Image (cartoon, grey):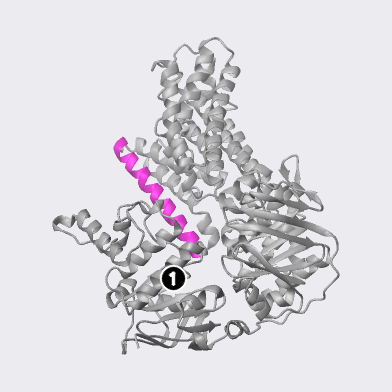
Amino acid sequence: MLLQLEGIQKSYGGVKALRDGNLSVSAGEVHLLLGENGAGKSTLMKIVAGIVERDAGRMLWNGTEVSLRTPSEAAAIGIAMVHQESLLAPHLSVAENIFLGREERKAFGWVDRRSVVTQARRLIEQYQFPLDAEARVDRLSPAGRQLVEICRAIQHGSSLLIFDEPTSSLSDAETHQVFRIVRDLKARKMGIIYITHRMDELRAIGDRVTVLRDGNTVYTGDLGATSTEDLIRHMVGREVAAIYQREHLAPGETMLEVRDVSVRLSNLKNVSLTLRKGEITGMAGLIGAGRTELCRAIFGIDPVDSGEIFVNGEPAAIRTPRDAVKRGIALVTEDRQLSGLALRLPIAANVTMAKVDKICRFGFLDLGKQNREVTALGQKLRLKAASPAQLGGTLSGGNQQKVVIAKWLFGDARIFLFDEPTRGIDIGAKAEVFELMSELARNGAAILMVSSELPELLQVADRILVMRQGRLAGELPRGATQEEVMRLAVMDAAA
Amino acid sequence: MKLTQKLLPFLSLIALFVALSIASPYFLTANNLASVARQTAVFNTMALGMTIVIVSGGIDLSVGSILGLSGLIGTMALEKGYPIPVGILVGLLVGTLCGFANGLMAAKLRIPPFVVTLGTLGIFRGLALIFSNGLPVHRIPPGFSFLGEGNLLGVPFVVWLLVICAVAVHVVLEHTRLGRYAFSIGSNKVASIYAGIPVDFHVVAVYAIGGALTGLAGMIEASRLMTGQPTAGQGYELQAIAAVVIGGGSLNGGEGSVVGTLIGAFIMGLLSNGADLLNISNYWQQAIIGAVIILAVTLDELRKRRMA
């Protein structure tokens, strides 16, 4: 056995990312690693590659226990990772990138450029990659960059390679190229761990499979003996953290309609949907499926290349977030600290941000009115804060989210796009956020709720749209199961 | 504890004041204090404009050149025979236009304001030298000296001006939509855009206001020297930025106040005056002021880190 992981645990600041991670890989095997967003796949692989250290558990490499503290320690014993996002230096050549940090130095620290290029050529020829050793990396396609990453990883005789969703940004032809390389490496008796979300590509390359859920290894077996249905069943079924029941009302008229919208920048293709008054429309999908990108397109952040958006039945040319806000659309972003809240400003300034005019006369602020209204709103949302003057950055995650919601309530928004509304929020506050969303719906708002937390989505949403690779993969009614959602999220509609 | 730390710049100012009163018998005289007020008026006025710019997350390195250019063109108008108030307005207008250009480029070209104003630092100075042929303007009506050197009710006229400007900028920052947006943009630009704030418009406005105040400072400087120097104001940008930063303004944006900036400018003014009175060489003054800037910002950072 090349690599064996037993009972690996890892926490990040009190949050358990891994509880019981088990995995074994032998030479000449392609081992697939599956799991929902946040199941712990990446953390487990980072531990193998020496990027993070485990808290507990055993890692055996060729039968002896090892502890890796840095990626270079991992590289030294023959473990390398092909990263999902390119970590290359774009202005350097392919050859320079392959040997970056590992150049043979001559006297006085000079780097022998010619020998670097020669070595790179030899490596590229050996694997028959379609790569020019002297090309600049920023001129390469995503697939080309992936190849450079692979070269970097295998360059000094690694015996275990980790691929983290290598095909997520590649075309079909490029995907087949990556598959060919994976098979070739396998034939050379390397061990390969391959993280993927795409059910259609699993069987093309995998030998064995391990499924992670909530930080635990829940299944390991031969791929040939496991049905796709079983895999999905193992992936879903996460424990439900908080039970939330909401009454479901008959939806009213359509408030937002997205018709056939495509965005080249973010790879959205022909997405259509409607949001109706009083309805919470859920949106599921894997990371990178285009959910955040859809919100960005509706809100006027990314330019829409084709298709139309209608607000209250009228065509709306939304080119900037300002256009969207004017039409009563609110975006509650997934990253509060970066794009939702001004951390160094008081709560009052945050809450009034989207409609300062309400507390303004001839350009002058009515601070008394501001504090009255903000205090009243804070009480309504049960915001835990000392005063409207408290700084946004000093609040807890849940209370920060309430401030963001208060901002849009104060801004008289009617159409709400919630992107991962419960991220980084504790369980108690989650229920309060759901209650707020229900209240909004009851009062006639239309809501899109994007979430990677399937149980939450199934509890809160009136119906669920599923996205996959930039397209709408399907719609499920209320009462759908996690399996049904996951099937749409990972499989081709044809399959 | 939080309050004493917030008061730290103010307490330093008082301590400096007391120390100088003890160290030099000439310090606490009406003449000297009036001279300090006049000396710092130019920096103070510029620093007020810089405060709004820095609060909005920007920076203006070109204020020294704006000061020179507006002082020059203002005095050129006086030389042509225009009445004194018109000449002062011309100077203000030139400053406003310079700030407007800075803001427009910072907002629309999407290059960092540091780079934009580094460029215009050269451009505005070059324009001043081109317009004047490198020669100062001397033929100025004597009445113009009142702006920088005159007294009103026994107090230097510039002090009245400074008080008016300070109150106005304070009101703008704390009590108007414009000021609120400046804080908002400076604290989180992305969130401001997403909240529908017309960010570009307000960035331009902020730089234009900063430019107007710098234009006024340029006219005060010209009045004190009774010349329009094309080279006036060289290096002043550092003084203005330092005043804001010593007073608790953050170069990351979203923080800063008029009171803080005034204290910062007076600390630097007193240091410079005290060094003169105590016969400390000009060379040392520069080094001392530099050290004070680092000290003040370090203390402020420590305070913020403890709060976070």
Residue A206 belongs to the span the image colors magenta: no
- Tell me if I can see residue B253 in this picture: yes
**Residue B23 in the image, given as x and y percentages of width and height:** 37, 43
Report the predominant secondary structure element of the magenta stretch. helix
Q: What residue do we see at 25% from left, 64% from top? A: A102
The residue pinned by badge 1 equals A179
Q: Is residue A359 above or below residue B168?
A: below
**Residue A308 in the image, given as x and y percentages of width and height:** 72, 51
Q: Which residues are magenta?
A: B281-306
The quadrant holding residue A257 is bottom right
**Residue B20 in the image, given as x and y percentages of width and height:** 40, 43
Q: Is residue B254 above or below residue A174?
A: above
Residue at the top extreme of this rendering: B81
Please give the count of numbered marks on the rendered protein: 1
Q: What residue do we see at 30% from left, 52% from top? A: A134
A110 relative position to A476: left or right: left
Residues A59 and A270: in front is A270
**Residue B49 in the image, given as x and y percentages of width and height:** 54, 37
Q: For mark 1, give the secondary structure.
A: helix
Name the quarter where the C terminus of chain A is drawn: bottom right
Q: Is residue A365 above or below residue A95?
A: above
Kind of residue at badge 1: Phe
Residues A315 and A170: in front is A170
